[in-house]
Image (cartoon, rainbow, N blue to C red):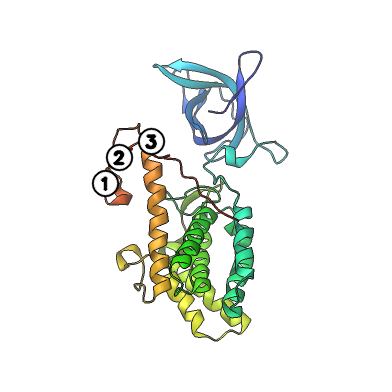
Amino acid sequence: MNFKTLPNGMCDGFVILKKCEEKNAKNGSVYLDLVLGDKDGEIPAKLWDYKGEGLFESEMVVKVRGTVEQYNGKDQFRISQIRPASSSDDYNIADLVPASEVGGAQIFDMLVKRVQAFEDADIKNIVLSILNDKKDLLINCPAAFRLHHAMLGGLMLHTISIVRMAEEICKIYPNINKELLLAGAILHDTAKTWEFQLSKTGLVKSYSTEGELIGHLVKGAIYVEEAAKKLGIESEKVVLLQHMILSHHGVPEFGSPVRPMFLEAEILSSLDSLDATIYEINNATSKVNTGDFTDRQWALDNRKLYNHGLSSTEHIVNIGE
């Protein structure tokens, strides 16, 4: 936990209430049983003799002051003071929850710059229309509920990773339509901003009812249709963009109603899977020592993974310019 140590031996800091329950002590008094968390970890905590002052609930950001004590051989935080964080407090939510090492707003601007350089006016205008319409949601949105890039700004980080890989592939295979591929890469997950329900921390807490029933692939294709109609664009390229979004999960068992049917759609599906897999492997192996195997990873075909120690297990993306 990233607490600041005070001269009197106590410590304080901003944390997220991962758990908050009222309980009764043996003497009849009420106390709060809590779990405090930030991006570095979690610690159980107690607020004794709680008199009902202040409303506290899970996912709140609060400032706490107290001492770290030992209970049954483990650290426990004894709270002496606690209050909800206010808008005037000097804290960064990215210090409290997992967050992209590069800001989502910065990546968003990089994507827009790429699109503005497109020569195909129809594709450029459709992509810019969707990006500008969804900007405020896109820049902070996670890319997933529990799996790859489930962090603040994770969607933008996942997107720029695919875009950068796509740009390199186009250097090797000049027959690829680069602008079509990049457009599909940029748009493929935009409807996750609609599919997810976010918690107070900005992370995903669940899927919306509509997200469960329809999903971001179908909704993303609808975004393209709506943008094209608004712009008066009638072109097969509209259908090509829709197909890339609908098919990017590859197969029906992963949610795609159709499989990729042209080159750029196939590449997008492969790069989407590759980026997610790289993230999951790095994340899993970072939690074990060199020479050890991970537990079985259900998201990776229930495989154990080996940390050989010959490369970094950190997930660092070269976002380019």
Q: Is residue 25 left or right of residue 56?
A: left
Q: Which residue is mark 2?
A: 306
Mark yes or no: residue 147 visible: no
Amino acid on which the number 2 mark rests in the picture = Tyr
Residue neighbourhood size for the residue with mark 1, other residues' Cα within 10 Å, grouped as few (<14), some (14–19), many (≥20): few
Amino acid identity at mark 1:
Arg
User: What residue sits right under mark 3 in the picture?
Assistant: 287
Q: Secondary structure at mark 3?
A: loop
Query: Which mark, residue 303?
Result: 1
- Quick one: label 2 or label 3, which is nearer the N terminus? 3
Do the residues bearing badges 1 and 2 touch, measured as CB atoms within 8 Å? no
Q: Which of 40 and 101 lies nearest the eye of the viewer?
A: 101
Q: Residue at x 46, y 20 (%)?
A: 75
Is any atom of residue 65 visible in this view? yes
Query: Considering only vertical position in the picture, is 228 above or below 282?
Result: below
- Of the residues under marks 1 and 3, which one precedes in the sequence? 3
Q: Quadrant of residue 215?
A: bottom left
Query: Quarter holding the C terminus?
Result: bottom right
